Image: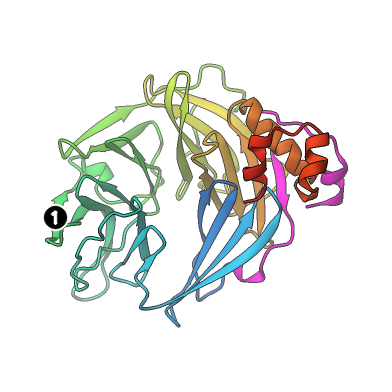
Amino acid sequence: MAEEVKNSYFAEKPYRLSKLSIVAPNVLGRTPQTDDPKLECQGWKLIFTMEFGCSNFTQTHIYNAFTSEWSKHNLMDGIETEYNRHVFKTRYGKRIAYDYDDGEDLPEIPRSEHPLECYGSTVYGDYLYTFGDLSISDEGTDRRFLCEIFRISLKGMGHEYISRPLHQNCDRRFDYSVVVAEDRVFFIGGQGFDQLVDLVEIPVFNLNSLSWTTVNTKPDRCSKSVQNYPEARVSPSCLVIDTCNGQEIVIAGGNGKFDNCTDIWTLNLTTYEWRFINVIDEINLMIMRVAQSQSHPNCMYICGTTGNFEIYRMWLQIPRLETMCLEAISHYQLYKLPDTDLIKFRVPPKFFEELKK
C-alpha cells in the first residue's frame, strides 16, 4: 500500500474511492493468450483467476485486503473440482464454476455435455443456466451473437434449449452483461448490429415462468451528471446490493461510443429509477471488474487493467460499526501485534479470530 495512504488518518466514507494495492503479479495483465482475470471475493480475499488456454492451465492469485498480501494457487487441467466448488468447461474452453454446500453430493454430469460459450451463467433450482452464444454460419462468414438461453441439468440430463428474446431489437446483441437478482435475469447494455443498446429499456428473463418482459427504467431526477440515464455502453461490470429501499443493481464502467466509461450508477429494482453515484476521475480504467463479499456486501471492490493492474474499493453505503473497527485495525496494521498488546488496546476478543485468518 502506498506510503502516503498508510500515513493518512483512517476514514471510511460512502462513495469515496481508495486504492488498496500498487504492486500486483505481472501475470494479471491482459496478454494475447489470456482474457482479463475473473474477479471474485470471499471475505477479505479477492480472488483473481487467469486461464491460459494454450496450456490448459489455471492460475489463481489471491489478494488479502485486510493484510495487503498476495498469495498464489495453481490448478492444472483435468482437476474438475475445487474445494466446495463444481467446475464446468464450456465448449470453447472457458470455465464456469458454482459453489455448493459442504457435504453435498456432486451431481453426475456427462463430460461430453459442455455448457455453451456465454456472457453469464447462474444456478437456479436443479439447472445451470447459460445466457448468450456465438453462432457461426456454415460458410464461416456470418457471426451472430444471440441472447439465447440454454440450461444443463445438474442431475445429468444434458442440455435443454429454453428461449430467445421476444423482441427483435434485443435478440441479437453482444458484449452485454448479465445480472441475476433472485429469480430474474437482467440483460444490461451491449451492442447490436449498428449501434450501442441504451439502458432505458432492459430485457428481463424470469427463471420461474421462463418468460420475457421489458423493464422501462426511470431517469435520475437529482443527477449531478450531464444526463439522467447512464450512457449506452458495452461490457459494464455489475453486481446487486441490498438497501433500505430494496435491491439495486450497480453498474460500473464499460466502453461507450467514443471513450471508456468511468461512471457508477445504481438501478432500484422496486422503482426502476436510476441513481448516479460517482465518476472515477482519479484513474483511467479501460476495463473495470467489480466484486463484493457476502460478509460486507455493500463494499464494492474494483480492479482495472489499463497498463498497470490496480485495485480500488468503494463503500456504497455506510459500513457497520464493527466493520469500520476491523478496517481501522487493518489500516494501522494492529493485526501484527501479539494478543496481549491487542487486549491493552481494548480490541474486542471476538475480533481475534478474524485477525488470524
Mark 1 element type = strand
Q: Where 135 sits versus 177, above or below?
A: below
109 on left or right of 302 = left
Q: Is residue 251 visible?
A: yes
Q: Residue at the location (55% across, 46% down)?
A: 43
Report x, y in % for residue 3: 86, 50
Magenta span has 21?
Answer: yes
Image location (x, y in percent) of residue 31: 56, 72
Which one is nearer the viewer's eye here, 314 or 285?
A: 314
Check if residue 8 falls in the magenta segment.
yes
| Figure check: 51 above or below 341 | below
How was this image coloured?
Answer: rainbow
Residue 143 image point, x, y percent:
28, 65
Residue shown at the point (27%, 44%) measured from the top left:
170
Kindly give the residue lying farthest to the front in the view shown: 340
Residue found at x 32% / y 58%: 118
**Stretch in magenta:** 1-30
Mark 1 Cα-neighbour bin, 10 Å: few <14, some 14–19, many ≥20: few
Circle 1 residue:
161
